[in-house]
Image: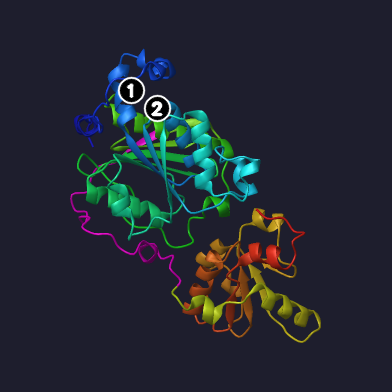
Amino acid sequence: MNAAAAASVTELPPVVEPAADLTAAEVERYSRHIIIPEIGAIGQRRLKNARVLVVGAGGLGSPVLLYLAAAGVGTLGIIDDDIVDLSNLQRQVIHGVTDVGRSKLESARSAVAELNPLVDVRLHHARLDSANALALFADYDLIVDGSDNFATRYLVNDAAALLGKPYVWGSIYRFDGQVSVFWEKHGPTYRDLYPDAPPAGSVPSCGEGGVFGMLCGAVGAMMVSEAVKLITGVGRTLLGRVLLFNALTASWREVQIASDPAGTPITELVDYELFCGTSPGPDADAEHGLTVRELAALLDARARGERDFDLIDVREPGEHEIVRIPGSRLIPQGRFVAGEALSNLPLDRDIVLYCKAGARSAEVLADLRRQGYSQVKHVPGGVLAWVKEIDPSLPLY
């Protein structure tokens, strides 16, 4: 993309009309914005009139929600179906110790109300899917995607494109973060950046690979900066560019992207789990799954010499160090993807796979069965179910 083309896709109109005059209390609260010439009272009135939906109240959603509320966005929608657990607090700064076990939506609403009671917070206790995305997005001016999986990211992209709405996207993994803006009628979409989903299991989630907690703040703040620019119509947005941040080297760089003229038009929502290869099929666990209690009985039988099988942990080495099911050996999923693990696994031997919660072990199981392994099962609940049901003295993560 040349410089002229890059400039043309980033000169965007404000996505929100200004609200009526600010109250005296609002002028005082937002005065540090209002005195900035590029924002001014009219920009603050646009923020007051804005309706922004944040997808996820987790690592990225936490700073995004706090800074949008502090900036004076009038209506904040939040969609999430999770509860707060102790492992969230390393990076999800909108939640606290007293929120553990509480709905993330309720926890986030309390934090926003404490910071800025002028914000109208709307809670959507659901998992975003093809059935609810269009109706949900239709009520908002702008979407901010803080999701942590590819299926949701493609869904957000396609729903926003069908409705003609802009959205801000961010992602984090270990020390690396990415931020961009997508708006189909003015420039490229997420599908121009990633036309095809990566093979299932090839990119671990943050829960599987880890994330540098402070990275969420850096990337989340940049996402809010882009959202505020879109709302107020100031500055040059990241539409047509992806900003890349490496916290380990403290370095920022950007890459340019453009709409693919040969790309397939987005005309409808699809099955995004199937598109991303993350849907194991309805009978996978019923046919090839073991409960942790069944596994415990098998391990006892193996200890008595009555059964013989391999128990394989397909997680990463750092996860295996934190907690493991006794009697297992580590073969990370990546070695199966690369084909390096098969030489150590005879076709005629019983194999039981497990991971953190069952997703990765299901993927490895499906791959092994495609390659002729008929005596393989997995533990759908993973090591988390083992800790909860068999040995609560072990740590969760």
Q: Amino acid at mark 1?
A: Gln
Say whether residue 36 is left or right of residue 203: left
In the image, what residue occupies the spot 65% across and 47% down? 86
Q: Is residue 209 magenta?
A: no
Residue lying furthest right:
304
Q: Which residues are magenta?
A: 254-280
Say whether residue 296 is left or right of residue 346: right
SS under mark 2 = loop
Q: Is residue 279 magenta?
A: yes
Q: Amino acid at mark 2?
A: Gly
379 above or below 118? below
Q: Specify the label residue 123 is tagged with.
A: none
186 above or below 118? below
Residue located beneath label 1 in the image:
44
Q: Is residue 277 visible?
A: yes
Say whether residue 293 is left or right of residue 304: left
In the image, what residue occupies the spot 48% across and 55% down? 203
**Residue 142 image position (x, y, % from top left):** 31, 39
Label pair 1/2, CB-CB below 8 angstroms: yes
Decide: few, some or many residues near mark 1? Use Cα within 10 Å; few <14, some 14-19, many ≥20.
Answer: many
Decide: few, some or many residues near mark 2? Use Cα within 10 Å; few <14, some 14-19, many ≥20.
Answer: many
In the image, what residue occupies the spot 52% across and 53% down? 82
**Residue 320 image position (x, y, % from top left):** 68, 58
Residue located beneath label 2 in the image:
72
